[in-house]
Amino acid sequence: MKLPIKSEETILEEISNHPKENPLAINILEKALKEFRGYVFKMPDPGTPVVSGMSGGADTTTTIAILLEEFGLEVYPFFVNRGQRSYQQEKQSVEYFSNIFKLKYPKLFHDPIEIKVPIPANEIKKDLTEKLRHDVGHPMRNSILTEYGVQYAFSLANHDKHVRNIFCSVVSSDGNYLYHSTLTAMRSLMFHIAVDMGDPSWQVTSLPVEKEMGFYFDKDTLVKWASKHDLPLEKTRTCVELSEKHCGVCDCCYDRKRSFEVAGVKDKTEYIDIRPSSQIRANNN
Ligand SMILES: [Zn+2]
């Protein structure tokens, strides 16, 4: 399956209609990146080693599969044990898909490293959670996670690997909720990391919203791609609750259900509450 390519004009229009994207900031940051190194983003050549987040969720799992299958990149995944409630379920998913990828791409896929670091710090988590702002979530969560990705990438020099690319899996609708999950935030992070490392070759992007590739798509495109490539997404973990099965009603489960419905792909996930997304949202409201 070919991933859907959009024209720059279409993407810019979607960005300007998006509730949390900032077209002005994207424009300024992209100009700065062009000044700094002559381009905004270039997909690395096949065989290039890259680092990618692997959370056990449907988005990062499918993004990694795409990096391997469509772009032939050598992927070093990292999984962050950050104090999340559904750590065990996420870990199970990471192990399950790692086994699939190792068999299918023995030369390209490496065992994920687990990085244990509380995000946010334990000492402030309770106060932060009580004051949670729904458009911010845990402040700086994605940039902190990504910066651990940079440290991991840099550390691979010790294994004779020169790694300057970090991939995340923000999709277009993630930013409907959170500022840190937008293309705008990704561009700001890319500039920050290239400057901070004193090396313009550093790239940080989220494949589903990498506009230089003509991408600005949502979870349903990932679900369709996974379905076409027999990736058993029901084994991924999206729900943030403690339950063994997906709860079926939290915001993350809502999005998961909706993405399968929009994609027209049968959702084999085991939910405690099996109602379709339209009924959950109506109920929550
Ligand atoms: Zn849930």
Image (cartoon, rainbow, N blue to C red):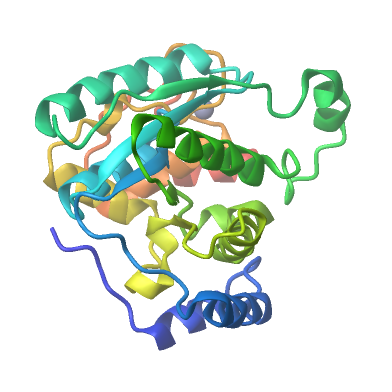
Tally of numbered tags: 0
**Residue 5, x across and y down, in percent:** 27, 73
| For residue 172, above or below residue 49 | below
| For residue 263, above or below residue 140 | below
Q: Residue at x 35, y 23 (%)?
A: 94
Nearer to us in this view, 174 or 99: 99
| For residue 84, above or below residue 32 | above
**Residue 25, x across and y down, in percent:** 67, 76
Q: Is residue 190 left or right of residue 114?
A: right
Q: Residue at x 44, y 11 (%)?
A: 244
| For residue 221, above or below residue 269 | below
Q: Quadrant of residue 271?
A: top left
Nearer to us in this view, 224 or 43: 43
Q: Residue at x 61, y 59 (%)?
A: 198
Which quadrant would the C terminus be assigned to in this image? top right
Q: Is residue 136 left or right of residue 212?
A: right
**Residue 124, x across and y down, in percent:** 85, 25
Q: Is residue 274 left or right of residue 285?
A: left
User: Can residue 283 be seen at all in this image of the molecule?
Assistant: no
Q: Is residue 261 left or right of residue 57?
A: left
User: Can residue 103 be seen at all in this image of the molecule?
Assistant: yes
Which quadrant would the N terminus be assigned to in this image? bottom left
Q: Quadrant of residue 162?
A: top left
**Residue 98, x across and y down, in percent:** 26, 24
Residue found at the very far bottom of the displayed protein: 9
